[in-house]
Amino acid sequence: MRKSTGKLVFIEFQSPTLVERAPADKDWLHEIKYDGYRTELIIEGGAARAFTRRGYDWSNRYKNIVQTAANLPVKSAIIDGEATVLGNTGLPDFQALERELGNPNSLKLMFFAFDLLHLNGRDLRQQPLIARKAALRNLLEETAPTLTYAEHLEVEGKEVFDHACRMGLEGIVSKRADSPYRSGVQTSWLKVKCIKSDTFPIVAFVEKLGAQPRRIASLYIGRRDGDRLLYAGKAQSGYTLEAARRVRERLDPLIIDKSPLSEPIKKPKATWVKPEVLAEVQFSGVTDRGILREAVFKGLREDLQPIPAKPAAPSKRRAEGKHGVPRENILQLLPDAVAPSKEELIGYWRRVADRALVHLSRRPLKLVRHAYGATFYHKGPLPPIPPTVHQLKVQKREGGEGVRVWVDDLDGLLGLVEMDAVELHPWNATIDDIEHPDQLVLDLDPGEGVAWETVIEAALSLRDIFEAAGLESWPKVTGGKGIHLTAPLPPNMTHDNSRKMARSIAQCLVDADPERYLLSADPAARAGRIFLDYLRNGRGNTAVGAFSPRARLGFPIAHPVTWKQVEAGVRPQAFTLARPFRPNFRKAA
């Protein structure tokens, strides 16, 4: 058992080896294979946490399970099991589990516990499985259904397997009764599946034409072969209407121009995506070319999202280690950020509120916060919200309900400072109609080696393209390294159509000079080119707001400018907290 600063930490799971037949001798225990998310509960000091297979802390998604575990009559424990939801048939339902994860307080989420690794200061992993399960059963006598002891059978494996298949279950796991618990894939645990299924990265989707709201019609999936990503087939069925919509929104920010596959494949209807989202897919077999037969979508595997291959930079790791911000509140850490004091922010907002509210008022806001010594894009539960800051309940794209904040006066802006907000990133829609944007934003983001004069030239060219499309754009220096162009939209424009329009406008410039401009955010391709970021458009997507300070050295401001100032070469960090109105044209980019 590993410890860190005296506390229990996540233990890598023991995993079974896949075999064709269940063992026949009497030295094995046989358990149902539950169709859900493998989960580890760590209980200590009257509190509990829940971890996924990859060691991600999902305590906030399993609140009822975690609270029930925290109330167990133990000083400490580590329990291995499976989080699942029983469907209408009484059997585990993977898609029902996905739906309920959008509601952390759901009473339908259940935890089937099948192993006990630690109890009251004792490491039990070297004890026989049969002894660990006996202790677990005693511990969970009165916690069902939220925490349910996973029963086992001591009869012939084939009989248990046949019965599981007749019931429509996924399969069984057979475990040696006398075996210790060892992390990693082990032959002392064996799994036999009634139905073949596995996890695959999604590489593309086909959209259901004309669907409102938009949804997928099918998915293209890949498979890993060493360092290569190869095509593995198309999953055309298994989607409920809700799942088809949810998957479409989940993949939206990952759309790319070219196939991520190592070997080209012609799929004219495909919308390619970064292969970062994993799907559980059921299939009848695999061809000699590695293509799945009769592939059926079961659900997304959010608990198995890939760990980034490249480790975080040392400076970022140090920053992560020093702050006290809960991990579930960090969408993106900004380790090199420099945040102004609250006194500086209060003084600034008092000076610019009238001008700023023209652009920020009555819009849902994404916040960059500075708290506990860290600066980060905030996600999840908010800190205490002052009465001067308004709240809006919205349906999240991934399911469930979330809260967005908005303001409409100076007191609201000062309330955001009280919430430790440093930067404000507004939606392109107002709270009066969040489903229809009233503006479009294009971000000109220069890569390494791009001269500022080239960015100015691109902005002026895009102004003409906007005009040709019937849109009157206005520029804003970002306080970073680029320029944003914003244009008002006609009424009743959808977020999807707004993004398509932004991409179409950007594509005109790319077509004119593909060596200078691109639509991909791939860092490897951006050197010497300008990324025309149209992805700032879309439901819930944002760009830094006009008059928002930036958490950067010198505290620059994202500031609207005139086209005459752009032609004169105004720099992206020309306005600062100390000089919010008069640009410094000599300031370096």
Image: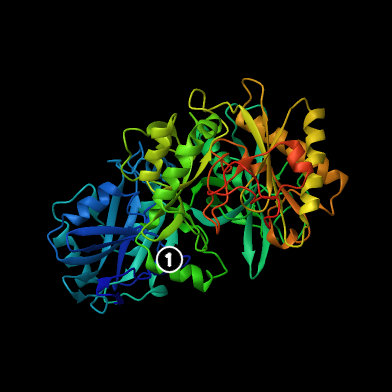
Quadrant containing the C terminus in the rendered view: bottom right
Q: Position of residue 407 (x, y in %)?
A: 43, 32
Task: Say if residue 208 shows up in the picture.
Answer: no
134 left or right of 383 in image: left
Tell me: residue 145, above or below residue 225: above
Given residues 569 and 87, the one toward you in this image is 569
Q: Which residue is mark 1?
A: 320
Between residues 304 and 137, which one lies in front from this camera angle?
304
In the picture, residue 244 is in which quadrant? top right
Image point (40%, 31%), residue name: 393
Query: 80 left or right of 307?
Result: left
Residue under the point 53% across and 35% down: 356
Q: Is residue 222 left or right of residue 357?
A: right
Kindly give the residue lying farthest to the bottom in the view shown.
Answer: 126
Residue 226: image quadrant is: bottom right
Residue 225 in view = yes
Which residue appears farthest toward the right when viewing the image?
Answer: 512
Amino acid carrying label 1: it is Glu
Left or right: 469 as drawn, with respect to 418:
right
Q: Position of residue 576 (x, y in %)?
A: 57, 49
Q: Residue 299: x percent and y percent?
A: 49, 46
Q: What residue is at 19 percent from the left and 72 percent from the top? A: 131
Secondary structure under the numbered disc 1 in the rendered image: helix
Quarter containing the N terminus:
bottom left
In front here: 358 or 379? Answer: 358
